[in-house]
Image (cartoon, helix red, strand yellow):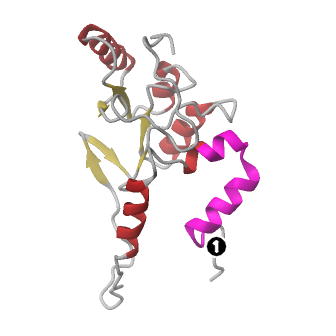
Amino acid sequence: MARDTWFETVAIAQERAKKRLPKSAYSSLISASEKGLTVADNVAAFGELGFAPHVIGALDKREMSTTVMGQEISLPVIISPTGVQAIHPDGEVAVARAAAARGTAMGLSSFASKPMEEVIAANSKTFFQIYWLGSRDDIAARAERARAAGAKGLIVTTDWSFSHGRDWGSPKIPEKMDLKT
């Protein structure tokens, strides 16, 4: 059996991404908030995990599907909401199509580069990430637009409103959000 060496380690994946992506995109992907303490703690905690494979009695075919917020997905992975994926012309629409092709859900960022209606049309199993920004009416309007577009649920993000420092340069939090995009 040939071994796929594309993602042998996270370090190799980062090395390849650094060579292929625009600097701004790469920096955004590997950045951390504030001093990166949470990221460092998460990496250290993951390193403490050990894996004990169980070979005897393993099933020939494993069932990986599950349900998230009423949506059946083929594997226990949901595409994380990541803003401004415009490094590719189709941006979030391309990611939504890829997720749909694999039978999984898409988390759509409030700061997407494509309109939510286009993304949801490409993957009906889309959850819209909503930031706790603006007035109650502003938040309700964004949630209603997501519902009308067919989003299956909301991913509510409250941390950026209070801690928005990034090691690579803090993006400006908008005073108002444009509901067209």
Q: Residue at x 64, y 47 (%)?
A: 26
**Circle 1 residues within 10 Å: few <14, some 14–19, many ≥20:** few
Q: Would you identify the image quadrant in which residue 132 lies?
A: top left
Which residue lies most toward the bottom here?
A: 56
* Residue 60: image location, x then y, percent: 39, 78
- Left or right: 181 as drawn, with respect to 53: right
Q: Which residues are magenta?
A: 7-27
Q: Disc 1 on helix, strand or loop?
A: loop
Q: Residue at x 33, y 83 (%)?
A: 58
- Left or right: 90 as drawn, with respect to 103: right
* Residue 121: image location, x then y, percent: 48, 25
* Residue 3: image location, x then y, percent: 63, 78
* Residue 87: image location, x then y, percent: 68, 35
Residue type marked 1:
Asp
- Left or right: 138 as drawn, with respect to 112: left
Mark 1 = which residue? 4
Total residue callouts: 1
Q: Is residue 22 magenta?
A: yes
143 relative to 23, above or below: above
Q: Main secondary structure of the magenta part?
A: helix
Which residue lies most toward the top here?
A: 137
Q: Residue at x 73, y 42 (%)?
A: 22
